[in-house]
Image (cartoon, coloured by chain):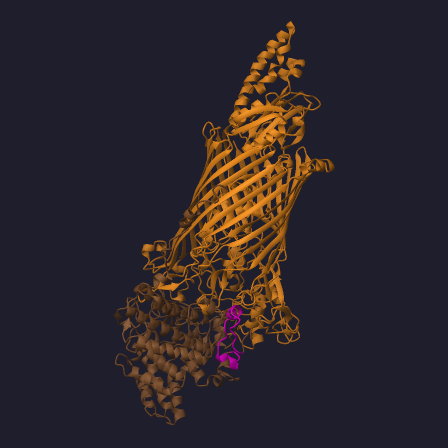
Amino acid sequence: MILTGTGFQACKKAVEVPVPKNSLVGSAVFSDNKTATAVMTGLYNTMHSAANISDGTWSIGKFMGTAADELHNYFIGVAATQFYKNNLSSNPGTYFWDNFFKFIYIANSTIEGVEQSETLKAEVKQQLLGEARFMRAFINFYAVNLYGDIPLPTSTDYKINNKLTRSSQQEAYKLILDDLQEAKKLLTAEYKSASNLTTTEKIRPNKAAATAMLARVYLYLKDWRNAELQATELIGNSSYGLIPLNQVFLKNSKEAIWQLASANPVYTNTMDGFFYTLKTTPGISNHNSMTDWLYNSFETGDARKTGWVGSFTAGATTYRYASKYKNSERSSAVTEYFMVLRIAEQFLIRAEARAQQDNPAALDDLNEIRFRAGLDDYNGATDKPSVLNAIQRERRVELFTEWGHRWFDLKRTGSLDALMSGPTGITALKGGEWNKNDTILPLPITEIAVNPNLRQNKGYDPQ
Amino acid sequence: MDYIVMPLRAGAGMRTHRESKRRLIIKTLLVMKLTVVLLTVFLLQANAEGLAQQVTVNARNTALPAIFKQVEKQTGYIFLYTDQTLEGTKPATINAVNMPLADFLRKLLEQQPLQFSIESKTIIIATKPVNKQTTEETDFLQLLFAAVTGKVTDNNGQPLAGINVLIKGTKTGTATDAAGNFSINAKKGDVLVFSGIGYESQEIVVKDGSVQAVMNIAETSLQEVVVNKGYYTDNKRTSTGNVSKVTGEDIARQPVSNPLAALSGRVPGMFISQSSGAPGSAFQVQIRGINSIANGNDPLYVIDGVPFSIAPELQNNNNLNPAGGNPLNLINPNDISSIEVLKDADATAIYGSRGANGVVLISTRKGKAGKAKVDVNFYQGIAQVTKQVKYLSTPQYLEMRKEAFKNDGVDPDPGYDFDVLGGNTWDPNSYTNWQDQLIGNTAKYTDAQASVSGGSDQIQYKIGGGYHRETTVYPGKNAMEKASMHVSLAGGSKDQRLKFNFSGSYVSENTTLPITDPVSIMSYFAPNAPKAFNEDGTLNWAGGTWLKGNPYAFLMQPYKGRATNLLANLMITYNIMKGLDFKTSLGYTNVNMDQRNLIPFTTIDPLRGESSGSSKFNNSDTRSWIAEPQLDYRLNIGKGKLSALAGLSFQQSHNEGTRLAARGFSSDLLLENIQAASIITVERLTDIFYKYNAAFGRINYSHDEKYIVNLTARRDGSSRFGPGKQFANFYAAGAAWVFSKEDRIEQALPFLSFGKLRASYGTSGNDQVADYSYLDRYNSTVNTYGGSQGLYPVNFYNPMLAWEENKKLEAALELGFLNDRFNLSISWYNNRSGNQLVESPLSVVTGFASISENLPAVVENKGWEFSFNSVNIRKAGFKWTSAFNITIPKNKLVSFPNFEASSYSERLIIGQPLTATKAYKYAGVDPETGLFQFMGSDGKPTISPIPLVDDISLLDFGPKFYGGLQNNISYGNFNLDFLFQFVKQKWMNYLYEHVEGLPGTFSANQPVDVLNRWQKEGDIAKFQRYNQDYSTIESSNNAVNSDLQYGDASYIRLKNVSLSYNLPARWINSLQLQTAKIYFQGQNLVTITNYKGYDPENRNYLVLPPLKVFTLGCQLTF
């Protein structure tokens, strides 16, 4: 016992260990320009890694494409089948939820870390704050459209965030708009590299990306005037423009406003390019084919029908597939980046916003897109519903399999339910059973269990 | 040495001429005999490790037993003698200061009719060879020619010294020498009685001039077992704590490569299950239940005083080993002399923050003084899976698929449903039993061990080496090979004030296994799936129609693992002054792993579009050292004995590792050449420092070995916690009352040979939380984005992380009956773990799915442990002993402040075990829809139960009771030992785990149970209707979450059988051997269970079950 009471002060030092070589602690990360920037790089990296929300087999584009009428599913995975048949359940599906909030945490920790840092350069601070605000808005936009009311964490404090209730969609949009407007102010027109130098690589969001998202958000909010203003700002920007179909999805194309570089040493180009391109009958390795509903919606002579659609024939059956990305080889030299925002959407946003405001210039924007696709100018009826209808049809064949545009368009224009329901509706034809509640995703059952303040969406268990 | 010579002086009183003539002859004989005796004494001395020990005794007219006890206390040696032996002895007066033990004993027994010998740490007291005054009267010719010689050995063939040999009905007798030899003047027909302390007496009729006696160890010694309590040793008789011991002999009876496998069913309170039948697989070990809500329920392993971290393999996420691996696999079971399991506070508090889940002490074998002895052991054997699951045959499978199409109202699709319609190399009518193919092989076991041991009183050594190889039941060249070396050196200075003990071992293990366990994908192969190989021997890809890939492709993707373990420990003891020793234990371990996963290009389905094979490399290196200076003090105060210990512990461990992924190889031949890869990714870098400091102490006071108090304490500091939370105190108090030593009880209950009541209370802790958990760390991303590495957050800042504390209470009764022929031990324990250190689940909205934190929840583990040992039959040449143990544990979440608001409220249930879960209550299949129904909380069956509302069935997966029954029967040269292990428990069966392969879907085979399914309206069936398009997935998922999926997983298993035969002495002698034994051993031979699945021990239908093993071997000593 003599020794028992002695020597502890000396021992204290002896149980201190250095931070592991592969880690940095938060305060250190945000004291250095490069490591602080690396946190946002990490976010883009994760977002474009395998089985994440942007690209490939677990992406929003793929799952919402099968949930709508763009893609058939041949894979027997639970999630794949549930999306395809519009038969989602709260268990076991966490779908996009987990990733969304991990990204929002990174955005929030960047905002907090950058704001508290006294050593970061002012321009780096501004850039990172801008990117973080933009990303928070970008993710919240998809979250609110997929899940309805969503919790809105704005800090990294887990004690608060673990008990959050779901905010209304209005509140969510308020935060989204606020973030995007702030991001637009903070970001510059230039693209920045991971060293915060100007670059031609369009793989980090810039002011134009914030503008593009603002245009889209205003459109969704039916704020036609602002949607038009934001879109106009981009369409008037000579850095961006419509280019031939076969160049649109190349890396850093003029069409691109924001793209994601590959973060995967196997899929060095895009995962969509690999997984959509059919080299065998769709099934275990390639899960999807393009539906005839989509294929038949192209007009005769539409260059996109041949340029952006591929086919594979097995015996008597011909399968079509989305072929926007041409590079379908793994580990091949990088020619394409994964598209997030592009200028064509802005033309279509402005066309719709103008049409809603009874501005005949709507057709000019529509025809720009049609012209690029080798089609004649729109010559249908020019009453408002017809023009709006033509614009939706154009969106369908222009933006197909990109980020679930079709699903969100059907949903925001109120036509989803009609298209999917009934014995001859899309869902029934896919072998499922449509239910009005299927327009939004269920919250993961685990989330409801952990945080009783989170209530489940209507039509899903547990209520 | 005059104590032995003395009786020879008997010739002194001879008077007559005739007598003097005879005297001459006798004298000659005596000289001869003296030579023998001197030689014997020399050997005895050489064998006497006791010389190394010193004793200080001041006794005046004291009875011998009391003096013996003093010596026992001071030296840790044990005296063996019977009351008869001490008959006729007188109280002794002796004054010795720091006298070498042997000298002391010599002096003490000088005037007594006793002699001693020292074997290991045991001092055998025996009657001196009978005074030759009697032989004086017998004819010297008889002395010359009727001498019977012989040898006495134990059941293992080891020679026994100090065994008394007496001619029945006379007073003529002698004792065996160090080599077990004796010589006695007996004639044909005389009956020789062999007796010795610790052994059962036996009688042998003299038939010729040579007699061989094999002595069986008497069970009476049970209470005398010395138990290792880590920093000190104790005697089972006087121990205040709960320690279970498994001997090296028990371990050696089992053909296992991991010592943990040898403990199943043998230690009360210890629940062990093997997770896989693949070589080198992981083990789950729990001592007295689950203390921690989240994780970290592993005991602390200490090998020869060096804590052995199980972290590198079990907690290192980089681990590529498909069988999980277990660092204790890097210990050679053959090197182990005993394993002690410490359970209660009294025994574990001295291990402070790491004692909460119990401590497993592994001691390796040491050399014994004596002439060099060579041991060789060799066995070979075979192993097979214990059981196959019965899957559907081809006709049954086709019937299921067709019925599913009919149910769904669709026709099979020629482009897809090849199993029904054929095509793409599918032949619907073919049949393959994939279990026969993939896990039906016979694994082969080979094991060879050799050692040399011996030494003098100055230095003792044991050097051994071993080799073990086992193959797998999978096709292909898979095997685990293990080579090991072990060295033990002990000795000291001439005056024995400085002593040292060194042990070192090095184990190198090479393992090749398939990366994917075929059992995990077994059900995805239809019975009529295509042949695995084309006619040209290449893999048949069947046009991409395999549901999970070609099974043989998986088997051709190897994991190659190399692991080495260097373990060294040096204990130096210096005697500063009387009763005070300074000791230092220094230890070093280095576990090094090099693992590879190889995916050859030829094993990848061409349709997957890969352009080359790929490989993964994982290197991990863990170096730990420990230094523990200690002071050890002993003092005798009248009848009381005080011992005290104080020490410091300094430990450090550094784990570094890198996991690389490499691809873009130009050829499969280059997969292990990372230079040939065009893309190399660092998937993970590990760099973990773990530092650990402590001060500990122990005070023990024993009064007359009747009343004993033991106090232990430890203050611990660990780097795993945030600033200000690194240190904590732990303590325990234990007390024992040996009531059988009370005179009144001794007289009133003569059949009670031993009785002890003991109790202990104290605390120990648990720091099994991931290192650096309190820091808000960012790690580098695995891949680059646009050429730049990113960072991603790993966890929140959490400086409040602190120890988990376990308060342990135990009470026990230990009884021995009829001279300890029957022994019963009953322990009751109640452990409460508080300040729970857990990974609490968080809403992902926070950014993470969990956080490490201390919760003010209390988990209680209480239970009863019974062990009963008996000597059922004890006759000459025939002995049958039994050992039975049973544990009845009870686990409960006692309290959880603010439970409803906590994130645990949906997962745990207050008042129920941590292993309890809620599930839907299965209510049969709806006769109308053919879908599963579940009982709603409103008492009505429903097809769509509501989570958290209709979870009304309460299930518990904790074991209800478990234990073992061991029997040992020896008959002549045969010895049969067998162990039954039993567990009463519930677990998931295999019926519904295949959510990705519902009955009726493409290429998903099913257990035959699904034949009892709904077919048409009105059917009452157990299983819902077949379905081929997953439209019934929801009700199937609900079934997975219902009690339908759970069932009885209790079992009784003939865990181990060992049958050995000691070759008769005459054969052995002619072969110049000391002993020779041949044996059969078996493991997991018979299992009685209702469990639906492969095996109730690993309870996992996606993992290879443990194997049944049969081996044949031989053991030679020369």
Left/right placement of residue B1060 relative to residue A384 reads: right
- In the rendered view, tell whether residue B1007 sits above or below residue B80: below
Look at the image and tell me whether residue B342 can be seen.
Answer: no
- In the rendered view, tell whether residue A64 sits above or below residue A51: below
- In the rendered view, tell whether residue B906 sits above or below residue B1051: below
Q: Main secondary structure of the magenta part?
A: loop
Asked if the stretch drawn in magenta spans residue B249, the answer is: no
Look at the image and tell me whether residue B578 can be seen.
Answer: yes
- The residue lying toward the viewer, choosing from B141 and A252, is A252
Residue numbers of the magenta segment: A431-458
Where residue B954 appears, as percent x and y from the top left, is 62, 64
Q: Which chain is brown?
A: A
Which residue of the protein is positioned furthest toward the right in this rendering?
B748
| Quarter holding residue A302 | bottom left
Left/right placement of residue A42 relative to residue B266 reads: left
Q: Which chain is orange?
A: B
- In the rendered view, tell whether residue A86 sits above or below residue B617: below
